[in-house]
Amino acid sequence: MFNGNVIEKTYVYDGSFAGLLTMVFDCYTEKVIPFKIVSQDEFEANFLENFERKQTEEEKASRIFHGIVKNISYDALYNSYYAFLSNTTEKEIQILKYLLNGFVLGPKIDTMLSIDFVFSVHAMRKKTLNEAHKLKGLLRFMEIGNNVFYASIHPSHNVLENVGHHFVKRLPLQNFIIHDKNRNLAFIYDTKEYQIVDASTFVLPTLSEEEKQYEQLWKTFFTTIAIQERTNPKLQMQFMPKKYWQDLIELKS
């Protein structure tokens, strides 16, 4: 196992995956593990807390990135990245311990699920990918004019890029925007390339008249095929959690 000293210090970083990998580099070379890691957005300084601001260094992050693949496994990199995208408290310290010990133990780290931080990383990755999988089936596009389609989502985890890549493969010739309203981010694809942009000032154009007609037809169809006597809200929520209903055309008022 990784032979590092736990220090009574909180590391504060910029919230990026590269920032986390930079801390892995520093902790590995200095043989230390911080008591806590928090992103700059979540950090509230107080005079009782011993903290250190860690700057992201791309060279260090790159060395760790390639080192994970070479010395642990590609699966370890995959696990770490999708665990990082989860909306889980203390995810950074769990991933840090997982990678530091992975550099000592190699690929077998992923067989040690009885260790809390290994189990935690696997569980976080699973939650993130499970939500992405659900949204790929539930996401609803609507036409907003100029041959551009738009969809809004409210995911618990940061799955925007994963979901966006799925639809780039499914709709390679279609311009579209997927809007993560929980994080104010938008995945924008123009049939050639994509970008993820800050959508805090994003203004949604009005729907085309044709889209409005299609939405009404879909709502009518959804209502018509429903059998009132067999309505089962609890069962419906098992397959389609209520937190996703706000983005479903057929369930909008």
Image: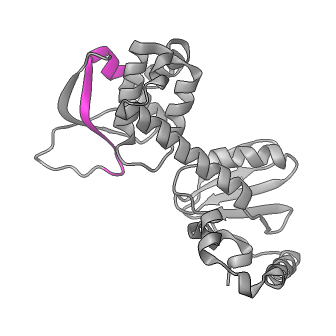
Identify whether 155 is placed above or below 16.
below
Identify whether 227 is placed above or below 142.
below
Residue 153 appears left or right of 171: left
Q: Residue at x 84, y 49 (%)?
A: 171
Residue 236 appears left or right of 25: right
Q: Which residues are magenta?
A: 25-42
Seen as rendered, the residue at the extreme left is 48
Q: Position of residue 69 (x, y in %)?
A: 55, 18
Q: Quadrant of the C terminus?
A: bottom right
**Residue 226: in magenta span:** no
Q: Quadrant of residue 217?
A: bottom right
Q: Quadrant of residue 92?
A: top left
Identify whether 30 is placed above or below 13.
above
**Residue 37: in magenta span:** yes
Give the color scheme: rainbow, by chain, secondary structure or one colour.
one colour
Residue 169 appears left or right of 160: right
Q: Residue at x 33, y 51 (%)?
A: 42
Residue closest to the eye, 12 or 79: 79
Q: Is residue 37 visible?
A: yes
Q: Quadrant of the N terminus?
A: top left
Q: Residue at x 86, y 76 (%)?
A: 214
Q: Position of residue 161 (x, y in %)?
A: 64, 45
